[in-house]
Image (cartoon, rainbow, N blue to C red):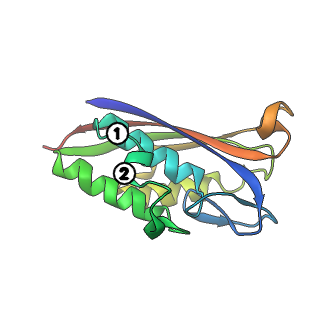
Amino acid sequence: MRVGIGHDTHRLGALRPLILGGLRIDYPKGLHGHSDADVVLHALTDAMLGAAGLGDIGDAYPDTDPIYKDADSAVFVRETIVKLNQKGYRVVNVDVTIFAQEPKLGTIKGRMREHLAAMLGLETDAVNVKAKTGEKVGSIGRGEAIGCQVAVLIDACV
């Protein structure tokens, strides 16, 4: 068994849809970034890569590569799962913490959990999604950014 931790933060305010955990969130601001800026899927990708000793998301999917401009971050997750499988690993469980003052995410955590579980080929109870505010402190607390941290457990495929 191996553990990986991923983190990502993006500035909020872009004139584009807000995408979190592969879901389009009804909110007037989006996240700035080269791809769709989905901090949840970026942190998840980073955690999986780290657990398998495969570097980080910047190595695997650099923001200098035009192929990833406005890319759906689900591509990063799917390709990383393939890389894990090629190394003989599978994802066992995932714990996600989203840091956002706004929008409030309480009503979508369950839907995001189900979506992530389906994306990863896991039972819903193997995925947990939490949301925390910034308590009005720092860029997240002022509503200027959204961040995410993900812990993932991988195991050898049997």
**Residue 98 in sight:** yes
- Disc 1 marks which residue? 55
- CA separation in Å, label 1 and label 2: 7 Å
Residue 3 occupies quadrant:
top left
Q: Residue most toward the front?
A: 64
Tell me, yes or no, if residue 97 can be seen here.
no
Question: Quarter of the image containing the C terminus?
Answer: top left
**Judging from the image, what secondary structure is the residue with disc 2 in?**
helix
Q: Is residue 16 above or below residue 125?
A: below
User: Pointer 1: residues within 10 angstroms few (<14), some, or many (20+)?
Assistant: some
Instruction: Report the residue marked by disc 2.
Output: 60
Identify which residue is drawn at 39% across, 52% down.
Answer: 123
Tell me, for residue 84, which label it has, or none: none
The reply, left or right, for residue 42 in relation to residue 145 is left
Residue 61 image offset from top left, x and y in percent: 41, 55
Q: Residue furthest left?
A: 158
The N terminus lies in quadrant? top left
| Res 16 quadrant in image | bottom right
- Whether residues under marks 1 and 2 lie with C-beta atoms below 8 angstroms apart, the answer is yes
N-terminal of the two: label 1 or label 2? Answer: 1
Q: Secondary structure at mark 1?
A: loop
Residue appearing at x 58%, y 64% in the figure: 36
Name the foreground residue: 108 vs 12.
12
Residue at x-position 51% and y-position 44%:
43
Mark 2 neighbour density, 10 Å: few (under 14) some (14–19) many (20 or more): some
Q: Nearer the viewer, residue 20 or 30?
A: 30
- Residue 80 placement (x, y as % from top left): 33, 53
Which of the two residues, 49 or 93, is positioned nearer the viewer here? 49
Tell me if 81 is positioned left or right of 152 in this view.
left
Residue type, label 1: Gly
Badge 2 amino acid: Ala
